[in-house]
DNA sequence: GATAATTGGCTCACCAATGGATTAGAGAGG
DNA sequence: CCTCTCTAATCCATTGGTGAGCCAATTATC
């Protein structure tokens, strides 16, 4: 008998997990089954699984079973769920990463109709006179730019950011920092950005968006 | 038998709803009917439906029935659902937007311990000899960089990308394009990136990551 | 309008599956 | 002989599924 049976079994199991043998349900067979099929005592299986759990490869739950950790907290919905805790600063940082590029993509990829939609949102934001209406068309302006980027995932990522922003602290911050002067400033920056889009200038659009977000960030976060 | 019956049923029902099986009446059969046709206890059906309601996929009303909520399309779960359709090219584009900045953030924000974790993933990738194990540590390397960026949302966004990549066409593409030479190339680029992180050079890290992703993109998408 | 049928909400007792833990013993190797 | 690993058996705690029953709200029927 080899003196390190459990380690061997651990290695073998790790390989079978990585190869996706039980990936369909994300669940490893129960200890007792593994013991009989591998012709080994349940104790030994348990020690092998202890190793894998130490490594974080699996998790075990009394009464439920042994589960592969990849894909455990990794379903799209669960990840989205965890995003709820993000701070306004974190969200702003991500916007700075995504939105300028989205604007650049839109400048090159958007159809005339899509740009017309962006323009419509801008016009409505200009005309709106109360804060909620302006907020709505402001958000719509940004979202329609993402929708014009021709990257489905990018658009949906913005949808996610928008969902996050519509929650908890953001609304208060926005309300507190809103003013007529800032609204005019936003509208002016939107207008400049729109001009870059309409003239199909990706780098100009990227710059205009970056500038606009810098303004927003300064207003909301005070820096 | 299977200790995850309710979860399986939830998955199956979600699929049937998405397929439009009951779209005409917007209504799912009563719990008791589902129980008998699926041959399980009503309690189990209820647990499965609880999951779907949590996700916002259905709503239930005493005395009326269980209804499909095709509404708004703004819930996080639904956004996540739409992301499933993203093409590999779209995903790659987003990675190019996020990962170089994540590397730059990590260079400035990471603790020594976090960088040690990144290094560990790199070492394990170097040592792994079969493709699934390498894939695992490769993904882990990238993810630990995001975890070191100190931006929760950024980290979760990468989790989202990873979840998308672990689905459908990606696995085939990776398998088809994998080779020992490419593995060595990836490891070398990871090493260069890691050096920039350890020497706390944000712009160097950003550049190294951008270069690495260019290689990956060329290999996977052929351009 | 009154009554019955339908439908989701809830609880309970019961059982099987499963991981957690302990104990005792058999062999192997120093 | 001592130590270490594996075997074997046993008991525990938790979880999830079953089956049954009753309640509450809604809808159909007369």
Image (tube, coloured by chain):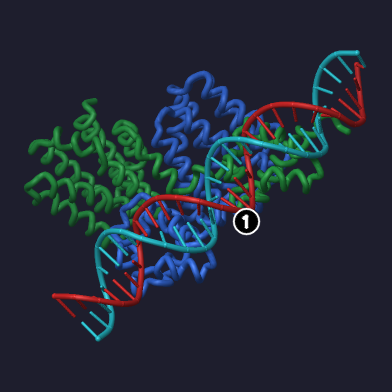
Chain colours: A green, B blue, C red, D cyan
On the image, the x and y values in percent for residue B92 come to 49, 47
Residue neighbourhood size for the residue with mark 1, other residues' Cα within 10 Å, grouped as few (<14), some (14–19), many (≥20): few
- Horizontal side of residue A51 vs A138, given as left or right: right
| Rendering quarter of residue B181 | top right
- Horizontal side of residue B37 vs A101, given as left or right: right
Quarter of the figure that contains the C terminus of chain A:
top left
Q: Report whether residue B173 is seen.
A: no
- Horizontal side of residue A184 vs A56, given as left or right: left
**Residue displayed at 52% across by 18% down:** B112
Q: Report whether residue B190 is seen.
A: yes
**Residue displayed at 21% across by 49% down:** A195
- Figure disc tally: 1
- The residue closer to the viewer here, A162 or A172, is A172
- The residue closer to the viewer here, A216 or A34, is A34
On the image, the x and y values in percent for residue B5 come to 55, 56
Quarter of the figure that contains the N terminus of chain A:
top right
**Residue displayed at 36% across by 43% down:** A101
**Residue displayed at 66% across by 33% down:** A50
- The residue closer to the viewer here, B15 or A34, is A34
- Horizontal side of residue A144 vs B119, given as left or right: left
Q: Which residue is mark 1?
A: B1
User: Against A146, is A186 above or below?
Assistant: above
On the image, the x and y values in percent for residue A87 come to 32, 32
Per the image, label 1 sits on a secondary structure element best described as: loop
User: Which chain is mark 1 on?
Assistant: B
On the image, the x and y values in percent for residue A12 come to 75, 40
């Amino acid at each position: 008998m080899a003196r390190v049976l459990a380690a061997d079994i651990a290695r073998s199991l790790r390989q079978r997990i990585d190869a996706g043998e039980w990936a369909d349900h994300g669940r490893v067979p129960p200890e007792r089954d593994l013991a009989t099929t591998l012709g080994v005592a349940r104790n030994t299986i348990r020690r092998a699984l202890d190793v894998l759990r130490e490594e974080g490869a699996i998790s075990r739950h009394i009464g439920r079973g042994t589960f592969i950790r990849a894909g455990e907290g990794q379903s799209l919905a669960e990840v989205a769920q965890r995003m709820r805790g993000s701070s306004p600063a974190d969200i702003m940082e991500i916007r700075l990463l995504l939105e300028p590029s989205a604007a650049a993509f839109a400048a090159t990829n958007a159809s005339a109709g899509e740009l017309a939609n962006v323009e419509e949102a801008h016009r409505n934001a200009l005309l709106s006179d109360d804060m909620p209406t302006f907020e709505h068309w402001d958000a719509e302006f940004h979202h329609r730019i993402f929708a014009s980027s021709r990257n489905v995932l990018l658009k949906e990522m913005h949808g996610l950011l928008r969902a996050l922003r519509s929650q908890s602290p953001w609304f208060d911050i926005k309300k507190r920092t809103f003013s007529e002067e800032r609204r005019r400033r936003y509208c002016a920056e939107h207008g400049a950005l729109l001009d870059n889009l309409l003239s199909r200038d990706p780098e100009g659009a990227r710059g205009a968006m970056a500038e606009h977000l810098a303004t927003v960030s300064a207003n909301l976060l005070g820096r």
